[in-house]
């Protein structure tokens, strides 16, 4: 048999009829008996009936299973509509009216419908037919109303169903009996679940009691649903359809009916929702499941791991294969764990199975887990509102509320994805407090549409950076795209290096603070911090040769701090110039970090510029064995201040061009090189003397240099500190001593030093670029991860 | 598209094998069995370098006159073997890959089921449905 798609009304109607025929509640309906009766009531030719039975496979099986029965009913409808009887027609013929079983059910059903509708007040929102799902007991109540309504049946209720009922005004005996059965159950239901007064109910009751061994709560409810269902279903489908079809005629009816008609849509929905026979979870059941859930997992919002669930459900003594299938159905998000909703669905399926219901192929909508993240509710009320439609082996998409199931189906996926997005946003939002961003970073890379703010992390070691940033802070805040970005780019590169590294380690907060903290330019908060940093690094690659910091005072300051270039130049006169000229060549090669300061003979060290490297100076001392004449420095210190300055001035120009050519962008580096040079010059002289001479230069620059955690600079910085006190001496000595001795040597040394300087600068640049590369790679990895997360959804 | 789909466990015994019933199934079973040799050969050849970089998709294992056999191996050495009809010339490599990916996803879903013991035959209806959908596409 092909899959049978039934509309909601059909579904209810058929299950009603099935329940009606399923006297022994064996889920199999014997051909003889009620089924034959039913088919005969359909007013079809016997041959047609036989054909139907053949088509639906009952003949093959020897009995009517639920699916066969449904197919048969559908074929009856097909035949009654005049279509040829064919297997395909069950699905292809659209909008079939419900099969009419003449003079039997319909009339009764219509009467029931009428009575039900008249009892709308009892059933709340239903058309009085089916009580709201939450209470099966209520359904009984509704059916109870049948009894009360019975007397009414004679009158108006007939009319609404008149189109169908009219042909058969005389209730045949069988319908009567059938009807009585309807009544009975209702009466019985009122008392209670299976008090089952009528013949129908008794067998059900027995069956129930038998099957409910394991689950007291559930047993009371499971069979009743179908019973009540058919009681009410029998009426409601025709009622609902009739109501919808003949609202006008309905109007004449009793007020109840008008009410019913008015609420037809709701009624239908309620009916359909209550029709979810075995797959609807009642309040009691739900509570029971929740309690069971709590025994395994106290946190209602938590998960039950697969192993625990396995143990739990294994206790139900169902075969593993079926449990496996139940798990497949109920683990909605396929995560190997059960949420509360999933657990309830699984439990419900287990109970259903234990009570003899076949497991569906698909998870019924009423059992679909609530999208907790989106709905944040897991109570039965939500289930009620769902148009539960399922339970039948046939996969019939609910027609009444197509949006709900589809929503339910899509929501989990959306939910899953939304969870991810939520977490991302959380992460990003939390990270906002962690890192500050330099919003002034103009997207150096025009391709990146997003301007990623540069995170400015202030580590303790970056205080000097902070100083520079402070200078820019004002402009940063005011001008998001200030040209100062160039400068910050350098600094922030370094910052970012640290910050991104830190970030990679887990979104840790920046150690320090940043001067600017605007994220405005970054619309993407998701994983933004890393991307921001990386994007900045992405921008920085453009600055492979970092643009020279615009009005960076340092280059000049580094020197100027140590000396007034103007002054020096102004002062520079013949003699001094000569001396100065001689000095630059004499500048000893820049000492490498590991190297001794080298043959820095004398360098006019700018006492101003070289500062608080006193601490490092001692290190320099032993490393500068070549330094000589420190004593001379001392001697000349006082007198040659000016000369120092001149020398420095000379030196600066010489060094500056060198440095600038090598790395114009790294202004700080330039500053450092300057300081290096100064250091060298200073170190050369006072290597062994007065290391701790206090720096005369203004603190900021040397401090900055000092804080730069670059070892290569340290030695030079140290040298600088040493030189402070002996600048004069150096300067004095330089011109006086080595001038004659090794001009060539000096020249060579100077060139060597210059080359070394450029080497260090380039090495530094290289390291920074490496860092940038690392950042970009990290960024790429994060993007790939995001892509991977998105990808699975497209494959399923 | 596929005429036969098989899931082979690490120890080279079948966990799941399904073919379109029109043909002699024994023939497909035999083809799958012989293809395991080719799979092992490919795994060992690739595994030399870096296991991490091993491709899950093995590609065409060997073609016969009527059929082509494709292979796919997971990181846990569970192999998927697919036999497709050679007459389906429109079947591109990408499609085969996507089919294997779907297979893999369904297989992991089966694995997630706590009631499934690894090494058991796969009796999941969902997996069945997915496989049948892949095989019935041609019909």
Image (cartoon, rainbow, N blue to C red):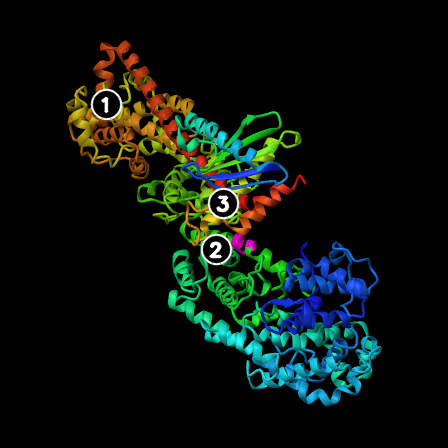
Q: Is residue B68 visible?
A: yes
**Tag 1 subunit:** A
Q: Which residue is mark 1?
A: A595
Residue drawn at (31%, 16%), measured in percent from left and top?
A: A752
Q: Is residue A35 magenta?
A: no
Residue B46's image quarter?
top left
Mark 2 or 3: in front is 2
Dot 2 or dot 1, earlier in sequence: 2
Disc sitting over residue A321 in the figure: 2
Numbered disc in front, either 3 or 1:
3
Q: Position of residue B24 (x, y in %)?
A: 59, 36
| Residues flagged by tags 3 and 1 on a common chain | no
* Residue A125 vertical placement versus A768 (above, below): below
Disc 2 or disc 1, which is closer to the eye? 2
Left-right relation of A409 to A715: right
Q: Secondary structure at mark 1?
A: loop
What is the chief secondary structure element of the magenta stretch?
helix
Q: Is residue A670 above or below residue B17?
A: above
Q: Which residue is mark 3?
A: B107
Whether labels 2 and 3 share one chain: no
Q: Residue at x 27, y 13 (%)?
A: A746
The answer to whether the residues at label 2 and label 3 have Cβ atoms under 8 Å apart is no
Quarter of the image with the N terminus of chain A is bottom right
**Alpha carbon distance from label 2 to label 1:** 76 Å
Q: Is residue A353 left or right of residue A717?
A: right
Which region shows up in magenta?
A413-418
Circles 2 and 1 on the same chain: yes
Spot occupied by residue A520 in the image (x, y as percentages of width and height): 52, 49
């Amino acid at each position: 048999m092909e899959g049978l798609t039934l509309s909601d009304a059909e579904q209810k109607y058929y299950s009603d009829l099935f329940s009606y025929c399923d006297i022994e509640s064996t889920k199999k309906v014997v051909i003889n008996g009620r089924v034959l009766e039913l088919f005969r009531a359909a007013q079809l030719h016997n041959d047609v009936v036989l054909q139907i039975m053949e088509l639906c496979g009952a003949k093959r099986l020897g009995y009517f299973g639920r699916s066969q029965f449904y197919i048969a009913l559908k074929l009856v409808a097909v035949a009654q509509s005049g279509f040829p009887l064919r297997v395909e027609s069950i699905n292809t013929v659209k909008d079939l009216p419900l099969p009419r079983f003449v003079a039997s059910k319909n009339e009764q059903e219509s009467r029931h419908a009428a009575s039900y509708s008249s009892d709308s007040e009892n059933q709340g929102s239903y058309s009085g037919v089916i009580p709201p799902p939450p209470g099966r007991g209520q359904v009984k109540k509704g059916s109870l109303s049948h009894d009360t309504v019975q007397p009414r049946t004679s009158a108006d209720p007939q009319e609404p169903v008149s189109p169908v009922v009219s042909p058969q005004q005389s209730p045949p005996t069988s319908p009567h009996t059938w009807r009585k059965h309807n009544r009975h159950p209702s009466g019985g239901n009122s008392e209670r679940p299976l008090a089952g007064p009528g013949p129908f109910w008794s067998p059900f009751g027995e069956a129930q009691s038998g099957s409910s061994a394991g689950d007291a709560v559930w047993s009371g409810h499971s069979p009743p649903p179908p019973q009540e269902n058919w009681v009410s279903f029998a009426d409601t489908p025709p009622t609902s359809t009739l109501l919808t079809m003949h609202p006008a005629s309905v109007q004449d009816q009793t007020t109840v009916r008008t009410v019913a008609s008015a609420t037809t849509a709701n009624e239908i929905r309620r009916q359909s929702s209550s029709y979810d026979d075995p797959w609807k979870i009642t309040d009691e059941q739900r509570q029971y499941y929740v309690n069971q859930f709590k025994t395994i997992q106290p946190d209602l919002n938590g998960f039950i791991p697969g192993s625990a669930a396995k143990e739990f459900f294994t206790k139900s003594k169902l075969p593993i294969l079926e449990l496996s299938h139940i798990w497949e159905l109920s683990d909605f998000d396929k995560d190997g764990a059960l949420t509360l909703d999933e657990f309830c669905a699984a439990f419900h399926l287990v109970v259903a199975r234990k009570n003899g219901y076949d497991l569906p192929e698909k998870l019924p909508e009423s059992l679909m887990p609530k999208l907790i993240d989106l709905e944040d509710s897991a109570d039965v009320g939500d289930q009620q509102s769902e148009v539960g439609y399922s339970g039948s082996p046939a996969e019939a998409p609910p027609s009444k509320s197509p949006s709900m199931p589809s929503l339910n189906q899509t929501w989990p996926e959306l939910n899953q994805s939304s969870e991810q997005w939520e977490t991302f946003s959380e992460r990003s939002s939390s990270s906002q407090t962690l890192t500050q961003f330099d919003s002034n970073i103009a997207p150096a890379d025009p391709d990146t549409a997003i301007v990623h703010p540069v995170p400015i992390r202030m580590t303790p070691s970056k205080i000097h950076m902070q100083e520079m940033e402070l200078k820019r802070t004002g402009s940063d805040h005011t001008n998001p795209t200030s040209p100062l970005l160039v400068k910050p780019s350098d600094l922030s590169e370094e910052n970012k290096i640290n910050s991104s590294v830190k970030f990679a380690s887990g979104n840790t907060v920046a150690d320090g603070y940043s001067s600017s903290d605007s994220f405005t330019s970054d619309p993407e908060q998701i994983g933004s911090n890393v991307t921001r940093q990386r994007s900045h690094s992405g921008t920085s690659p453009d600055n492979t040769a970092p643009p020279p910091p615009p009005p960076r005072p340092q280059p000049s300051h580094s020197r100027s701090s140590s000396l007034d270039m103007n002054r020096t130049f102004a002062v520079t006169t013949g003699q001094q110039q000569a001396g100065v000229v001689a000095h630059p060549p004499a500048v000893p090669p820049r000492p490498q970090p590991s190297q001794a300061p080298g043959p820095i003979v004398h360098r006019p060290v700018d006492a101003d510029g070289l500062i608080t490297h006193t601490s490092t100076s001692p290190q320099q001392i032993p490393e500068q064995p070549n330094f000589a004449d420190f004593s001379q420095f001392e001697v000349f210190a006082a007198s040659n201040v000016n000369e120092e300055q001149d020398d420095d001035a000379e030196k600066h120009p010489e060094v500056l061009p060198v440095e600038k050519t090598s790395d114009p962008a790294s202004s700080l580096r330039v500053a450092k090189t300057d300081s290096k040079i100064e250091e060298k010059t200073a170190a050369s002289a006072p290597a062994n003397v007065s290391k701790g001479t206090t720096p005369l230069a203004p603190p900021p620059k040397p401090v900055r240099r000092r804080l730069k955690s670059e070892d290569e600079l340290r030695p030079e910085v140290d040298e600088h500190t040493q030189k402070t006190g002996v600048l004069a001496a150096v300067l004095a000595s330089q011109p006086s001593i080595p001038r004659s001795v090794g001009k060539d040597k000096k020249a060579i040394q100077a060139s060597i030093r210059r080359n070394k300087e450029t080497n260090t600068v380039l090495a530094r640049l290289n390291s920074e670029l490496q860092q940038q590369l690392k950042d970009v790679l990290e960024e790429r990895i994060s993007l790939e991860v995001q892509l991977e997360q998105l990808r699975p959804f497209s494959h399923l | 598209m596929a005429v036969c789909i098989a899931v082979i466990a690490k120890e080279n015994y079948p966990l799941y094998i399904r073919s379109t019933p029109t043909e002699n199934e024994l023939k497909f079973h035999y083809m799958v069995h012989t293809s395991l040799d080719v799979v092992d050969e490919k795994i060992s050849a690739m595994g030399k370098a870096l296991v991490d970089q091993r491709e899950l998709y093995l590609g065409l294992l060997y073609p016969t006159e009527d059929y082509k056999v494709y292979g796919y191996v997971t990181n846990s050495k569970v192999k998927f073997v697919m036999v497709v009809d050679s007459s389906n010339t429109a079947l591109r490599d990408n499609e085969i890959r996507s089919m294997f990916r779907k297979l893999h996803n369904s297989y992991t879903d089966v694995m997630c089921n706590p009631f499934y013991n690894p090494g058991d035959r796969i009796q999941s209806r969902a997996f069945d449905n997915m496989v049948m959908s892949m095989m019935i596409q041609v019909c």
